[in-house]
Image: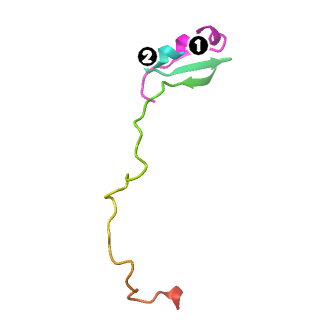
Amino acid sequence: MNGQQMAQITTTELPQTLQTLFIEVERTKTPLTIIHEGKPLVIIYPATTQTPHPVFGTMKGSGEILGDLIAPVAELWEVLE
């Protein structure tokens, strides 16, 4: 995680304050741990917005042609004998 201290609440406190907690997590960008019977139950992380990456063209220019793929093989492979 990012080294920040996470806030914690119990499940009995959750229904009254759910909307407020979501807004607070979004505002502070700090995760919130929900505790049930003394054990961590859920961690709520702030949503991150990611810029969409193009599907086509992402590998453009990353390949290298090492030889002729169409020319006949100069040596005979064992599996072809």
N-terminal of the pair, mark 1 or mark 2, is: 1
Task: Tell me which corner region of the image, top left, top right, bottom left or bottom right, holds residue 52.
Answer: top left
Which mark, residue 18?
A: 1
Query: Disc 1 vs disc 2: Cβ atoms closer than 8 Å?
Result: no
Q: Is residue 42 left or right of residue 68?
A: right
Percent coordinates x, y for residue 79 in the rendering: 53, 86
| Residue shown at 53% from the left, 13% from the top | 21
Q: Is residue 30 left or right of residue 63?
A: right
Percent coordinates x, y for residue 57 in the rendering: 37, 53
Residue 80 colored in magenta in the image: no
Residue type (three-letter) at the residue carrying disc 1: Leu
SS category of the residue bearing label 2: helix
Residue type (three-letter) at the residue carrying disc 2: Arg
Q: Residues within 10 Å of mark 1 (few under 14, many from 20)?
A: few
SS category of the residue bearing label 1: helix
Disc 1/disc 2 C-alpha distance (Å): 14 Å
Percent coordinates x, y for residue 17 in the rendering: 58, 9
| Residue shown at 56% from the left, 12% from the top | 19
Residues 66 and 78: in front is: 66
Of all residues, the one furthest to the right in this rendering is 37
Residue 9 colored in magenta in the image: yes
Q: Is residue 2 left or right of residue 18?
A: left
Which mark, residue 27?
A: 2
Percent coordinates x, y for residue 53 in the rendering: 40, 43
Task: Tell me which corner region of the image, top left, top right, bottom left or bottom right, holds residue 70.
Answer: bottom left
Residues drawn in magenta: 1-21
